[in-house]
C-alpha cells in the first residue's frame, strides 16, 4: 500500500511540475515529441501491422521483464481452481470422476460431486490447458493477454482515427497487459476482455461493410464472454444487441435479403453452437445442461447472496474448520452489504485497476465526449454494465473485463478532446496528453523494480518450493496438511491436479476428529508426510502415525 501511495504522490508531483513547465515553456521538447508522434501516425495507417505489433510487443516486453517478475506461482483459491480446469482439459477431459477420498481432498472453489472439477466457466481453463501443452500454463496467460491487446486495438480502429487507436492500444498494454494481475496470475480477465473487444469492434464494421466475417467475429466474442463471464457478458451484450436490432429495422438498415445471410444467420449459428457447448459442458460437470458449475458451488458451499437485494442464507455446516470460517465469517466481512458501500468499493477497485492517477487525467474532458453522438452507445454500455456489476455481491476487476475495449475507446476519445485545450494560447492540453503517456510508460519499470524487491505471495512460493522438493524425491507422496486454530484461510495448501491417483504428490487435510485410516489405506503405496502449515517457515516432516485425530 505504501508503494502505491508513494507512486500516486510521485505522479501528482510530476503533474504539477509538468503543468508549470507547459505554462512557462509550452513548446518544451516539442521537436522530439513531434518526431515520435509523426512516426506513430504513419505507422498507425497500417492497421493490420499495428494489431500484430501490439500482440508481439506484449509478449516480448513481458518476457523481457522476467528477470524482475518471473513466471507467477498461484496464490489465491481461484487460481488453483482455474489451474485444475486447465489440467483437466489438458488430460482430454471436461471433468474428472469424483474421488473416494474427496472428504480429505476437499478445497475451495472446486466441486467434488457429481464430478471433481473447477466451478468456473471453461474459457480460462482452456487457455491454461493450451499453455500447459506448450510447457507451462502461464504461456497460455501470456498469449491470451497478447490476444487481448490485439483485439482491443482492432476494436479501437473501428471507433477512432488510426493514430488514436494505436495510442489506446499502447496505453492498454502498458497499464494492464504487462503489470496487472491479468498477466501475472492465473485468474484470467484477458479472455473476457478479448470477447468484449470483438463484440464492440465488430459493431461499426457490420454497419459499414455488412461482411459475414465481422458478424462471425461479433458472435465469437459473445461466445468467449459466455464461457468466461456469462452474467456480465450477457449484460454487456444487451446494448449492442439492441443497437444491431434497431439498425436492422431502421430506414438506413440493409434489406432483409442482404442482412439475413451476412448478419443474422452467422450470428445465430455461432450463438446456437455456443449454447449447445455450454449446455454440454454443464451436463458433463454438474449432470444438468441447465445447471452451471458455479451455480452448483454456490448452492452447496456458499451462504452469501449473489445479488445485494437477496437475504443471507442461514450458516451452513462444513466438513472442516477452514470452510467453516471462510464461508460463515470471512466471506461475510469481505464484501460490503449496502448499496452505497458497494458502489464506493467497486468504483475504487475499477479506478485503481483500469486507470490510476495517470489515466484519470484525460477524463476531465469527458463532458465533451458525451457530446459525441457516436460515443453515446459506449457510454450507455458502461452505465448498463456498471449497474449489473453494482447489483452483484462479489466483485473483482476482471468481472468488468468485457468493458476493457469500451473504456479505452472512451479514454482515447477524451484524450483527443484534451489535446486541443489551450489556456491563453498555451497548449496545456497537449502537454497533459504527453504527460499521460510518459507517466504510463514510467510506471512499468517502477513497478518491476518494486516487484524485484518485494515478490508477491511468499507463502505460495514456499508451497511451490516444497512441491518441487517432493517432485525431486523418489517415489510418490501424500502430504497431510495440518492447520492451527488461527490459520489464515486465504493461505490454502490443499490443491491438487486432475489425476488424483497418479499424481506425484497429493495434498490432503488432516481433519480433527476424522479417522485418517481410510485415506492412508487408499494411498498405502505412498510416502506420507505431515505439513505444519502455520509454523514459520512451514514444517514438512515424515508421518510417524502420531498426533493424528481419531
Image (cartoon, rainbow, N blue to C red):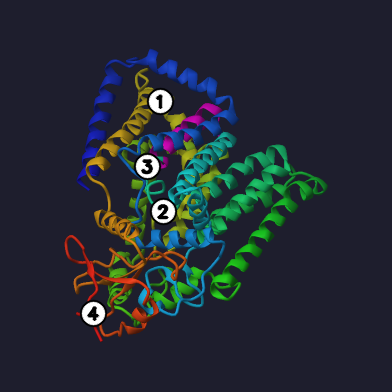
Q: How many marks?
A: 4
State the residue position of label 4.
545
Q: CA distance from mark 2 to mark 1?
A: 42 Å
Magenta residue span: 160-177
Which of pointers 3 and 2 lies earlier in the amino acid sequence? 2
State the residue position of label 1.
421
State the residue position of label 3.
355
Q: CA distance from mark 4 to mark 2?
A: 37 Å
Location of residue 8 by image quarter? top left
Judged by its main secondary structure, the magenta piece is: helix
Q: In percent of the image, x 44 and y 34: which residue is there?
A: 60
Of circles 3 and 2, the one toward us is 2
120, above or below 546, in the image: above
Which of pointers 4 and 2 lies earlier in the amino acid sequence? 2
Of circles 3 and 4, the one toward us is 4
Residue 382, can we see it?
no
Of circles 2 and 1, the one toward us is 2
468, above or below 46, in the image: below
| 108 within the magenta span | no
33, above or below 248, in the image: above
Work out which residue is located at the far front of the displayed protein and give it: 474
Of circles 3 and 1, the one toward us is 3
Amino acid at each position: 500500500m505504501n508503494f502505491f501511495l508513494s507512486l500516486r504522490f510521485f505522479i501528482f508531483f510530476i503533474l504539477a511540475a509538468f503543468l508549470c513547465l507547459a505554462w512557462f515553456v509550452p513548446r518544451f521538447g516539442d521537436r522530439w515529441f513531434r518526431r515520435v508522434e509523426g512516426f506513430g501516425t504513419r505507422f498507425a495507417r497500417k492497421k493490420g501491422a499495428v494489431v500484430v505489433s501490439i500482440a508481439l510487443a506484449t509478449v516480448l516486453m513481458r518476457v523481457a521483464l522476467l528477470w524482475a517478475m518471473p513466471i507467477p506461482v498461484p496464490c489465491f483459491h481461484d487460481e488453483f481452481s482455474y489451474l485444475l480446469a486447465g489440467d483437466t482439459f489438458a488430460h482430454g477431459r471436461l471433468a474428472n470422476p469424483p474421488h473416494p477420498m474427496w472428504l480429505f481432498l476437499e478445497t475451495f472453489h472446486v466441486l467434488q460431486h457429481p464430478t471433481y472439477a473447477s466451478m468456473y466457466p471453461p474459457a480460462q481453463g482452456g487457455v491454461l490447458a493450451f499453455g500447459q501443452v506448450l510447457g507451462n500454463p502461464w504461456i497460455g496467460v501470456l498469449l491470451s493477454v497478447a490476444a487481448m491487446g490485439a483485439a482491443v486495438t482492432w476494436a479501437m480502429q473501428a471507433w477512432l482515427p488510426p493514430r488514436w487507436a494505436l495510442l489506446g492500444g499502447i496505453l492498454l498494454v502498458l497499464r494492464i497487459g504487462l503489470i496487472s494481475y491479468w498477466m501475472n496470475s492465473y485468474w484470467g480477465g484477458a479472455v473476457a476482455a478479448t470477447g468484449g473487444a470483438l463484440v464492440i469492434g465488430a459493431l461499426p464494421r457490420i454497419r459499414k461493410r455488412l461482411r459475414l466475417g465481422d458478424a462471425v467475429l461479433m458472435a465469437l466474442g459473445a461466445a468467449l464472454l459466455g464461457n468466461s463471464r456469462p452474467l456480465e457478458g450477457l449484460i454487456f451484450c444487451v446494448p449492442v444487441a439492441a443497437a444491431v436490432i434497431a439498425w436492422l429495422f431502421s430506414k438506413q438498415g440493409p434489406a432483409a435479403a442482404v442482412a439475413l445471410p451476412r448478419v443474422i444467420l452467422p450470428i445465430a449459428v455461432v450463438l446456437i453452437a455456443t449454447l449447445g457447448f455450454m449446455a454440454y459442458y454443464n451436463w458433463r460437470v454438474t449432470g444438468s445442461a441447465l445447471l452451471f458449475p458455479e451455480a452448483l458451488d454456490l448452492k452447496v458451499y456458499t451462504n452469501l447472496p449473489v445479488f445485494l437485494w437477496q437475504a443471507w442464507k442461514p450458516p451452513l455446516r462444513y466438513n472442516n474448520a477452514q470452510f467453516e470460517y471462510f464461508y460463515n465469517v470471512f466471506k461475510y466481512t469481505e464484501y460490503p452489504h449496502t448499496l452505497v458501500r458497494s458502489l464506493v468499493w467497486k468504483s475504487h477497485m475499477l479506478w485503481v485497476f483500469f486507470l490510476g492517477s495517470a489515466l484519470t487525467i484525460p477524463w476531465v474532458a469527458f463532458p465533451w465526449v458525451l457530446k459525441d453522438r457516436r460515443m453515446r452507445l459506449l457510454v450507455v454500455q458502461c452505465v448498463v454494465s456498471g449497474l449489473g456489476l453494482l447489483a452483484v455481491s462479489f466483485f473483482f476487476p476482471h468481472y468488468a473485463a468485457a468493458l476493457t475495449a469500451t473504456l479505452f475507446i472512451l479514454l482515447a476519445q477524451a484524450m483527443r478532446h484534451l489535446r486541443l485545450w489551450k489556456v491563453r494560447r498555451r497548449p496545456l492540453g497537449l502537454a497533459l496528453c504527453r504527460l499521460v503517456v510518459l507517466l504510463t510508460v514510467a510506471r512499468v519499470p517502477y513497478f518491476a523494480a518494486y516487484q524485484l524487491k518485494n515478490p508477491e505471495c511468499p507463502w505460495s512460493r514456499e508451497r511451490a518450493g516444497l512441491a518441487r522438493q517432493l517432485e525431486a524425491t523418489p517415489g510418490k507422496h501424500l502430504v497431510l496438511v495440518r492447520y492451527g486454530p488461527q490459520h489464515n484461510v486465504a493461505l490454502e495448501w490443499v490443491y491438487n491436479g486432475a489425476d488424483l491417483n497418479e499424481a506425484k504428490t497429493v495434498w490432503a487435510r488432516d481433519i480433527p476428529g476424522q479417522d485418517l485410516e481410510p485415506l492412508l489405506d487408499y494411498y498405502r503405496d505412498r510416502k506420507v508426510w505431515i505439513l505444519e502449515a502455520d509454523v514459520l517457515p512451514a514444517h514438512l516432516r515424515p508421518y510417524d502415525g502420531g498426533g493424528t485425530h481419531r
